[in-house]
Image (cartoon, rainbow, N blue to C red):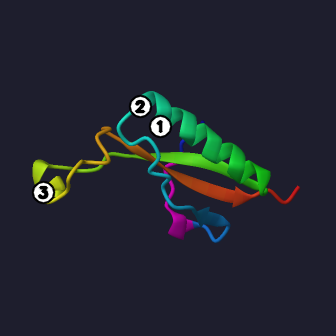
Amino acid sequence: MRRRRETCGSSSQLICHPVHGLAGTNRFLYDVYTRVAELDLRGIGLGTEWEEMRPQLTEETWQGTLRSYWTLDSFRIPLCRMNVF
């Protein structure tokens, strides 16, 4: 997986895709789902680069929630580019 230090607003060719939130409590499964998401995006003609982000989560973030659905220290945001050729 490639990582990129560019934001979506810096290039009109970049497409932002929502973060996949799958397996946010298990690093191994999160890595698997990240790869599956990349393959799905490739299937529709999008090349994907990943930006890793570190959320600032505290106990207060999950206050009033039965179970926290994200416990990993980081998540990846896909930056996609249409593969024309």
- Look at the numbered disc 1 and give the secondary structure of its residue: helix
| Rendered view: 64 above or below 28 | below
In the image: residue 69, left or right of residue 50: left
**Viewer-nearest of labels 2 and 3?**
3
Check residue 27 in the rendering and tell me which mark sits there, or answer none.
Answer: 2
**Other residues around mark 1 within 10 Å, as few (<14) / some (14–19) / many (≥20):** some
Q: Residue at x 63, y 64 (%)?
A: 14
Could you say where residue 27 lies in the image, as x and y percent from the top left?
41, 31
User: Quick check: 54 left or right of 34?
Assistant: left
Which numbered circle lies on residue 63?
Answer: 3
Instruction: Identify the magenta region.
Output: 4-10
Which amino acid, by three-letter code, is at mark 2?
Arg
Q: Residues within 10 Å of mark 2 (few under 14, many from 20)?
A: some
Residue 22 sits inside the magenta stretch? no
Q: Nearer the viewer, mark 3 or mark 1?
A: 3
CA–CA distance in space, label 2 to label 3:
23 Å
Among the 4 quarters of the image, the one containing residue 60: bottom left
The reply to whether residue 2 is in sight is no
Residue closest to the eye, 84 or 6 = 84
Q: Is residue 84 above or below residue 59?
A: below
Name the foreground residue: 16 vs 24: 24
In the picture of the structure, the residue carrying the numbered disc 1 is: 30
Circle 3 Cα neighbour tier, 10 Å, few/some/many (<14 / 14–19 / ≥20): few
Position of 62 compared to 11: left or right? left
